[in-house]
Image (tube, rainbow, N blue to C red):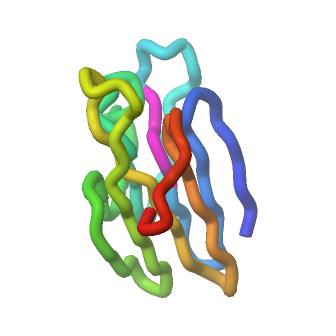
Amino acid sequence: MLITWHGQGAVQLKLKDATVLIDPYNKDSGLVAMRKPFSAILLTHGAKDQENIKSIKEPGVVIESAGEYEVGEIGIEGSESNFEKPEDSKQVIYTVHAEELNICHLADLDHELSDKQ
C-alpha cells in the first residue's frame, strides 16, 4: 500500500487493485485538481473545500456517512464523531481494511475518542 498526502485533508491509499481518496479538495484551494479515477472517495465532513468530486473523472463509490462498506476487496468502517464545539458539524472517522493493514483517518479530530469509537 502506498499512502500519499495531497495537501489539506486529502489522503490517497493506492492498493494493488484499487485506489481510495479521502477528502478531496476543490479547485479554489489553489492545489492541483485530482482527475485520476478512484475506486472509492470517502468524505469525512461537509466542508465545502474538501468535497469537490466534480473534477474527478471517475470517482467510483462515494461514501459520506457512518456505516460498514465493501468496495471490491476493501473493507471500510465509518464511525460518527462530533466536534468538541456543538456548533461545528459532525464528521466521520474512517478505517480502511485492505492488504492485511488497517488504516484509520481521523479527519479533523479535536478531542479524545470514546472506547466505542
Q: How many marks can you see? A: 0
Relative to 87, say whether 83 is above or below: below
Question: At x 50% / y 30%, what residue is drawn?
Answer: 33
30 lies left or right of 48:
right
Question: Magenta span: helix, strand or loop, mainly?
Answer: loop
Q: Quadrant of residue 99?
A: bottom right
10 lies left or right of 61:
right
- Please provide percent x and percent y for residue 15: 64, 72
Quadrant location of the N terminus in the rendered image: bottom right
Question: At x 49% / y 16%, what residue is drawn?
Answer: 29
Question: At x 39% / y 77%, what residue is drawn?
Answer: 71
Pick the residue in front: 107 or 110.
110
**Residue 53 appears in the rendering:** no
Pick the residue in front: 68 or 63.
68
- Please provide percent x and percent y for residue 59: 36, 53
- Please provide percent x and percent y for residue 86: 27, 27
Quadrant location of the C terminus in the rendered image: bottom left
**Residue 13 appears in the rendering:** yes
Relative to 18, say whether 7 is above or below: above
Question: At x 45% / y 79%, what residue is drawn?
Answer: 75
Pick the residue in front: 88 or 105.
88
Tell whether position 76 is magenta.
no
- Image: magenta residue range: 21-25
Q: Quadrant of residue 103?
A: bottom right
Q: Quadrant of residue 76?
A: bottom left
- Please provide percent x and percent y for residue 104: 58, 61
Tell whether position 24 is magenta.
yes
